[in-house]
Amino acid sequence: MSNSQTQSRRPLVAGNWKLHKTLGEARELVAALIAELADGALDAAGPEVVVAPVFTALSSVRDALRGSPITHAAQDLHWEATGAFTGEVSAPLLLDLDCAYVIVGHSERRQFFGDSDEAVRKKAAAALQAGLPPIICVGESLEQRQAGDTETHVLGQLRAALEGLDPEALARVVIAYEPIWAIGTGHSASPEDAQAVHAAIRAAVAADHGQALASGMRLLYGGSVKPDNAATLMAQPDIDGALVGGASLDANSFAAIVRAAAIRE
Ligand code: PGA
């Protein structure tokens, strides 16, 4: 353990596959990942590892992961459980597929599909109400960072997403800080800059919901996490794991990031 602050927080490494991988490719990636991590990195004391394939591959990935401690997650959901909502998928359906988490408010959803702060709040609340923990994404644009608005923006998104949740629900929330300018660009935030935002997020959760809840909440960093920067990012006291895009599409590089999280402990 690097310090007392991290003691109760098990690292979490989540792979966001986005719109990639056919069923066959998804099965292959899972098999390769299990083989890569057969060296003990996945024992009970190690990091929690999750992969988030496209909706259509969830069932196959679940079957391919059977017997492995790796779990699967969905990349989004709708807040209504059932009804006339063509094209949508709901929390009960994701639980039906044994999903362990659902990603909510990814910047690509916000940017390309119009997910507002209000939509993110409703999605997170619906997931929690159904018993599915959300990984809620927040993060600033390059313009916001350059204007010195990073904290205002990120904490605004955070507070909007957590509004109205009771403490029991909040205890199951995972936050992913993903600066938009770092996603898919190869330029991750520096460990110091990422740590500063993570510390601000934890302080805001402590101010709003109490220190105990804030100390237990897992805060992931996302945005160009790679095998060569994962260890230094996750060595920061308030960075409890990673949400990985591009590097999660390759078993070798994702496994290296998982190992970096194991060292953190
Ligand atoms: P990246 O994506 O690792 O490819 O930058 C991260 C994410 O969008 O979650």
Image: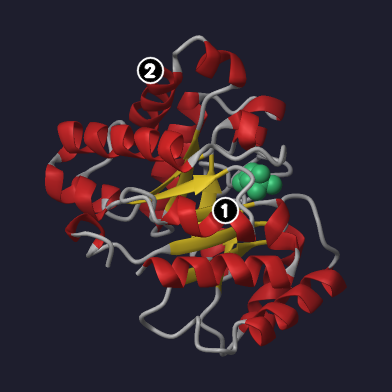
Q: Secondary structure at mark 1?
A: helix
From the viewer's side, name the closer residue of 176 and 63: 176
**Dot 2, crowdedness within 10 Å: few (<14), some or many (≥20)?**
few
Q: Amino acid at mark 2?
A: Thr
Q: Residue at x 44, y 38 (%)?
A: 194
Above or below: residue 136 compared with residue 67: above
Q: Which residue is mark 1?
A: 229
Q: Amino acid at mark 1?
A: Asn
Residue 112 rendering spot, x and y as whole percentages: 72, 28
Q: Quadrant of the N terminus?
A: bottom left
From the viewer's side, name the closer residue of 68 and 3: 3
Q: Measure the C-alpha gap from mark 1 to mark 2.
A: 26 Å
Q: Which residue is mark 2?
A: 152
The image's colouring method is: secondary structure
Residue 208 rendering spot, x and y as whole percentages: 19, 32
Q: Residue at x 46, y 25 (%)?
A: 118
Q: How many marks?
A: 2
